[in-house]
Image: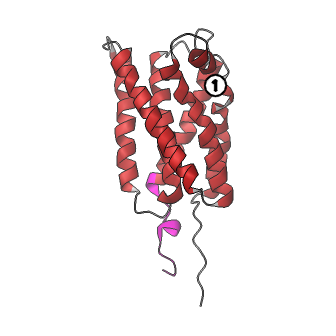
Amino acid sequence: MTTQPIDSRPHLTLQWILTVTGVTGIPAIFLPFTVGTSPWAAAFGGYGLWQIALPAFLSLPVTYLLIRWLIAKKLLITEQLIACLLSIASVFTTLAVYVKDMAYPADLKEWVAFILPLLIICSGIFILVRIRNKKMFNPYGAILCLQLAYLANCVLSLGAFIGEWQSGAYLIMLTVTAYLIQLILVLKGDPKYDAEPGA
């Protein structure tokens, strides 16, 4: 008697909906985030803001890898390695903002913007450890790393300019929301998916 292979894509329909929603992070790169400046302009326009702007570009590899995973059910080892390296570089870039440019918080809004990205990074490490033995960790762990790096940076940017958002910021917020729901689904798991074959 043979058993059916377990699909490596739990909550498949919802994952597709969230992936399509997260695509909004790509045009957001080129749309004004605040004061008429897009992440692209902030990174390459001579503003000296590349450290806070470049991680917004992670929506490109995240979208590509999510579609690859949802269609092919797997990722190449090289794709996973590149994703992990990009996420590590992005996290260090975000942390560098704290060292170089971040002023001491003066009010509650600034404290939230200051602390929340750090909580996301710490929570991300916890999630990765929590799901390391689940079947979806390979290959979704690499995508998860990128999403966490994106979330930490974008929450820092959104919090720093709250009340001054423009179209790009709202699209990034939509992408952030989609990624957060995907992370919740990953942490929650899927009983059918996590069950052993033949159980």
Residue 94 horizontal/vertical position (percent): 43, 27
Is residue 180 inside the magenta stretch?
A: no
In the image as oriented, which residue stretches furthest toward the bottom? 1
Give the quarter of the figure containing the N terminus: bottom right
Residue denoted by label 1 = 29
Q: Secondary structure at mark 1?
A: helix
Q: Residue at x 40, y 63 (%)?
A: 133
Residue 62 appears in which quarter of the rendering? top right
- The amino acid type, in three-letter code, at marker 1 is Ile
Magenta-highlighted residues: 187-199
Residue 141 horizontal/vertical position (percent): 48, 52
Residue 29 horizontal/vertical position (percent): 64, 25
Looking at the picture, tell me which residue is in the foreground, 62 or 7: 62
Q: Residues within 10 Å of mark 1 (few under 14, many from 20)?
A: many
Residue 99 appears in which quarter of the rendering? top left
Up the image or down, 179 lies above or below 73; here it is above
User: Coloring scheme of the render?
Assistant: secondary structure
Q: Is residue 16 left or right of residue 117?
A: right
